[in-house]
Each structure stands twice: as structure tokens, then as C-alpha cells.
Amino acid sequence: MWLSFWRSRDRFSLDELRYLTDQLIKVQIVNEVNKDFVIEALRSIAELITYGDQHDAAFFEFFMEKQVLGEFVRILRISRTLFVSLQLLQTMSIMIQNLKSEHSIYYMFSNEHVNYLITYSFDFRNEELLSYYISFLRAISGKLNKDTISLLVKTRNDEVVSFPLYVEAIRFAFHEEGMIRTAVRALTLNVYHVGDEAVNKFVASNQHADYFLHLVKFFRGQCISFSVMVSNASKNLGVESSSSLLSAIDEIEDNLYYFSDVISAGIPEVGRLIMDGILTLLIFPLILPSLRTGVVNETGLGAVTSLYLLCCILRIVKIKDLANTVASALLCHIETFSLRSELKLNGHVSDHGSSDASQNADENNVGPDSYSESLQVTIPLSSSSQSPTADNNLPQQFTPREALLSFVTCGDDVQVSGSLSLLATLLQTKELDESMVDALGILPQRKQHKKLLLQALVGEESGEEQLFSSESTVVKDGISSELDIYLQKLKDQYGVSCSSPMVGASPRVHRCQVLDALVSLFCRSNISAETLWDGGWLFRQLLPHSKAEFKSHHARLLTDAFHNCTHRLLEETRGTWPDMLVTVLCDEWRKCKRVIEASSLRKDPICMLLPPYRSASEELVSSDSSFIAGERMCHTVKVFVLLHHLHVFSLGRILLDQPPLLSPVDTPEESRAKNAGVNPSGPKPGIEINLVDAVPCRIAFERGKERHFYFLSISMGSSGWVVLAEEVVTKPHHGVIRVASPLAGSNPRIDDRHSRWLHLRIRPSLFSFTDSAKHSSHGKVKSRALVDGRWTLAFRDEESCKFALTMILEETRLQSHEVERRLKPLLELEKDLDSSNPTQPMEDKTS
């Protein structure tokens, strides 16, 4: 008998659950003496209930029979130690998360014990306790559906009057800890997506709708801080600043994706609240006015940050009314937004007065107890703010759309990139009505033609007339009516009155303005090639089917820009990297074609926020380095290829897959390369050559160790080398190549004091720096320091030194002429476009 009494119980058995429950019932107070037992009992019961839910229904039957959940609540009431509260919350979270049986979940939620735990006054000053509490709430939300959610709410007359889970959770929606904010947002989404009409009405009621307004206010505060961070990052390029900036970008986009997820739940009133909040708290008072502000202050946004935020809002928060309202607001004077904005939400109008920076900071830091405060919207636009360079070309009153075009024509590279990204985002926003896109002047020609064709087919006279007229444009009445609807909505709902004369103008006028700005952009020399390619993509989208909108002065400006770029390209044939020019051109030709023919602009708007492009060469090498010369050559080639493509498109021609270049010619018989017997593949170390044209010299590759060589300069087509060969003793006038370096960029120079010394710069052989200083996926700048070599050759006499110099100059000239000859069809644009068979490599008739 005694052996049976001392036999150990099976851990996962009903007897074990019965024993633990009996012992827990006997506990009358929890203190430091018995807390360990209580904690272990709670933990073990959670394990047993989870095990029984999957293996034996008798476990949960016993749990219900003994009302163990009520015992949990009693233990919490009599507990005087924090650790028991922690374990109880963890026990409840584990049980709720792991219960699979619907019957078990219904029981857990069907009494008031869960709601009691939700509303219990825990000491949330303890961060660990708060974390366990939020996990407990999130676990409950994970089991919500249309059946279970009704067990957690109180109703009166079929209306929800109490929902502790939701109300208590949103108290921590703006907690300083990001993980808690994330958990609360996940919980709210679980609630919204249940789709219970009574609950949806509850969360959108006046009593709880402030959550969504404070959510936008919290986001606004993040945007203001983010703008300052962007400004600081542009001045201080470093790994730390870039990493912080990317983390802030993730937070901004996470907030917008949360807005989008909430809206997708399909609660109309909530969607309207969020949309109105974004417009009245962020876009109208901050983003649009900042397009004329050059200085980022503590309560404002920078222009580039505003452009990025607009791109993200349109791309992520997909609301048709929001997109069309923003588009119509772009046609209103900026002063309209910066004077006064009235917000009509929840049946009341809140005044928006000016305030100091400290008051604005308090608004942005919305805490769990701040819902009762009145909603004040500050318009942080100082009249003393300086304007960017582009503002000097704008009238005193101008619209955000005009500011965008001004950035394109006069702004810096970052402003141009941001403006083009926003225009591309508007063009690609599916929620934006085509007539609104046309009112902005950026509706693609293929969509215009399609719309007019449909109108003509259904018998609309105006559509048929415009389809076959020289001035192709969409129906003005349709555009005016759609635009007027949203302009009236701006006035009635948001107090924004639009008096811009451009509103009544024909969309054709707006398209001409955009084309003017883009053509002006292509004529600028201080913009990066990548940004110009973005402009080329937009130009390709807007390119007319006819020449009605592409004026003669547009063609003239593009032609002048092309000829100027041609001169710069010709200079590169005589520069440091002519031997790589054709290769780079062919590569960039294909890349540029892919970019501007793509269906959408693939450039991420984040690029406009990263610190401006600054190559490692600007810090690591001198200004006369071949590294800088190579970057300049790459930029020139990219711009040249773009301008060539634009000419082809503007004439309605099909762009070739490969550039029309002349084929290489054989090396002439009377050349130094032929005389030396160099293979067509070029000189390689260890190869024997004829030294007939070589000049003896001395050079020291190490201090104090002079070596004797024969120096030779040769060119073969577009390639060239300077060669040092050692004489073969057993074979007169023959030598073995020891060193062969690029001829181009050698910059030969006779020493001022020693007329027998010849100085050469030896640049790298491979073109490995084309992408050596670009932003990586983590926003860091890849740096690859390349240092040019230096040779000082000592010849026997002054005449030998001059002969070597002449030999280098002659071979360099031959190399440059060959590169220029191969490029000739591209440089003569008119002849290139009129070529009858441009797809095949062209043969040089004179060769």
C-alpha cells in the first residue's frame, strides 16, 4: 500500500491536473513563501490543458468542471507579488494560442474572466509585465471571428457599448517601444478584419474615432523628425547616418502599410477618417506648402522629404478619393494651404491656430491618456523661410504642380529626381482617374488615343473630331466635370479654395508645359545621367503620336543638346579611356533602352532620400586621376545615348538593339604593331617581339634596382599599349615582353630638369570602376580606391627621349582616330536615322 502511495504521478495525466488544481484551490494568499509553487502550478496547468486539447478531451472537461479559470482570477486578486502576475498572463497566452478546439475557445471567452483580466489594474510601470500583457491581448485577438468576438463585447439594443479588448489595447498604440506598437496594430487589424458590423460601428463611433486621428498625428510627428534626419544625412554621408535613415524609412512605410491594411478591412467611416486625417494633418498643412520651402526647421518638412512622402502615400494608401484629391490640390495655389485649414471630423470643426515648437512637439508625442485633448493642427510654415533655387523662377503665387516643373528645370539633382518620381507615381497610380492625370498634363499618349477612339466609336462628336484633328486632346467637358467635383470637395470639406487660372486651361497646355520642362532638363549639364534617364522614361510615356505638341523649338533644343554632348564624346576619344569607349557605349545603349522602354519606372523613391551620389574618387584620389576621367567618360556616354534615343523616339522611329557602329579595320601593314610582330590579340607578357622600332631605356621598379628594357608604343585599332621588353641575347633585335600597359591616358611628359627622363602615367587596364561608388541595398557607399601607376624612363640621350615621346603621341592619335571613325554613324545623327539598313554593322567605304 505504501509503495502505491509513493508511486510518482504521470506528468501528462488527468491525475496531475487534478492534484495541481486541488493544491491551487487551497491557496488563500500568495506571498514570497508560496509564490514559487503557485508559479509552477500555473505553468504546469497551461501545459496540461494544451496537451489535453490535442489528445484527451477529459482534460478540458475537468478544467471547466472545476472552473479553473475562475481560480486563476482569484489567485491574481490575492497575489502580492509581481511574478505571479507575469506567470498568469503567460499561462493565459499559452493556453489561448495553442487551443485548437472551438469548444475550448468558446468556453474561455464565454464568461467574464477574460474581460476581467483585460481590465485588471496591472502595474504597467514594469516593462516586462506590459510586454506579457500585450502578448496576452494579441493572443486573444488571434482567435477572433464573427462568433467569438460577440463573447467579448457588451451590447445594448443590438449596439456594442463595451469592448475592453480593443479599448485597452489602443491605450498603448503610441508607446515608445516599437514592439508594443506593432503588437497593438496587429491586434486592431484582427478586430477590423472580423467584419462584424456592430463592432465596426463601435470602433468608428465618436467615442473611439479619435484613435485614427491621433494615429495620423503620430505619423505626422514621425514625418517631421524624419525630414530633419534626411537633411542631416545629406550633409554627413556615413554608414551610421545611412543606416539610421533606412530604419526611419522602414518606420514611415510601415505606418502607411498599416493605414492601407486598416482601410482594406472595408469600414467606410474609418477609411474616410484616415483619408481626411492624412489630407488635413499632413498633406495640406505640411507637404504641399513645403514645396516652396528651402530650409528644414523643427516643425516643417523639406521639399525632398515631401516629394518622397507623397510618392509613398499614393503608392501604398490606395484610396481613389485620396489620389484624386491630391491630384486636384496640385493645381491650387500653395498659399491656399498655408493660410488656414479647417478640419471637419466627428461632426465638429477644430480651429487651427499657430503655435510654438514646444506645443507642436507635444501634439506629435501622443500618449495613451491624450485622447481627451482637443485636436489642433499647426501650420508650421514660416514666412521667413528661404526658398530653393527653383523658386526664383516661379511667380509669387504658384501651384504645387508648377513647383514640380520648376524643380525639373532649375532644381538640383535630388529635387529633379524627387519631382520625376512623383510625376511617375501619379502616372502609374491606378486609383487616379485618367481625366485627372490628363489635367496634370501627364496622361500617356496611348491612353489618350484609346479614349478618343472609344468616344468616336460610341458616336461622341467631340471625340471623333479630336481623334482626327491635328491637336489631339481629350474631351474638355469630361475633364472639367471630374476636376470640378474634386475642386468643389476641396472647398466644401477642407476649406481649400482654388483660384488658379491653370485649372480652366486645356490639358494640352499642361502637356506642353511638361514637355517644355523635360526638354529643358535634357539640356542641363549638372544633372546625373541616372536622373536624366528617369526623365527619358517620362518623356517616352508622353511622346505624341504627331508633332502637334512636340514643337520645333523642342527638336532644336534636343538637337543642340545632342551636338554639345557629341563634342564632349569626341573629347573622350582623345581622353584617358578611348579604348573602353565603344564597349561602354554598347553596354549603356542596352541599359538605357530597357529603362526608357519599361512599362513602369523601376526606380525606388528611396533613392531620392539617400545622400547625394558622391564617388569615392572625390575623396581618395587626385583630380587628375584616371578614375575621375573614367567616371566623366561614363556620364558622357550615358547622356549621349539618352539624347540619341530621344531623337529616335521623337521622330517616330524604332530604336535599335545595338548602336550602329562601323566595324573594326585590320591593322595597317606599315605600323609599329606589324613591324613588331604583335599578335592581333595584343601584347602579352612572355611573348617575343621584334625590337625594330624600340628604344633602349632604364627604369627602377624598386628603389636602387635599375633594369634595362626596350621601350615600344603600339596601337591596334581602338587599343594601344606601352611595352617594356627585355632583349634576347641569343637573338639580336628581338625581345620578350615583360610589361604591357594601356597607351591611352599615359600623359607623356619630359622632365623639366632632366631632358633624358620621360614621365608616364599608367592607368588600370580594366574598366572596373563603372559601378564602384553606388549605393548598396543597405544604403552604404561602396568605395574602391584605384591609384594610377607612375613610370619614369631614363634614355641614353635627349634624342631617344624625344623619339619615345613622339612615338607615344603618334600611336595615341591613331588610336583616337580609329575610335572616332567607329563612332561616326552615331555622331552624324541625321545620316544615322536615314540609313537604309541600320540593323547591320556598317562598313567603312574609305577603309
Image (tube, rainbow, N blue to C red):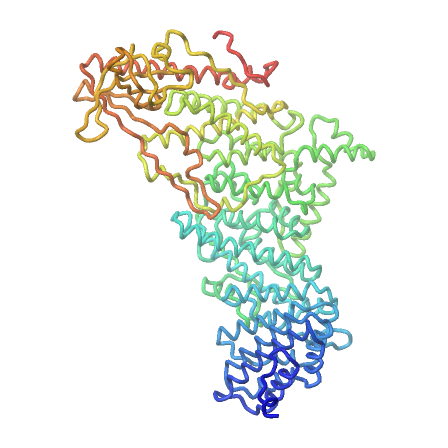
Residue drawn 78% across the image and 35% down it: 454
Instruction: Residue 32 in the image: state x and y as whole percent.
Output: 48, 87
Residue drawn 50% across the image and 35% down it: 530
Image: 391 above or below 834: below
Quadrant for residue 773, please give it: top left
Q: How many marks?
A: 0
* Front one among 585 and 283: 585
- Please indicate whether residue 581 sits to the left or right of residue 728 in the image: right
Instruction: Residue 707 in the image: state x and y as whole percent.
Output: 21, 23
Instruction: Residue 539 in the image: state x and y as whole percent.
Output: 59, 32
* Front one among 467 and 89: 89
* Front one among 778 and 8: 8
Residue drawn 48% across the image and 89% down it: 33
- In the picture, the quarter occupied by the N terminus is bottom right
- Please indicate whether residue 796 sits to the left or right of residue 6 in the image: left
Q: Residue furthest right?
A: 459
Quadrant for residue 616, please give it: top left
Instruction: Residue 825 in the image: state x and y as whole percent.
Output: 52, 16
- Please indicate whether residue 725 sits to the left or right of residue 299 in the image: left
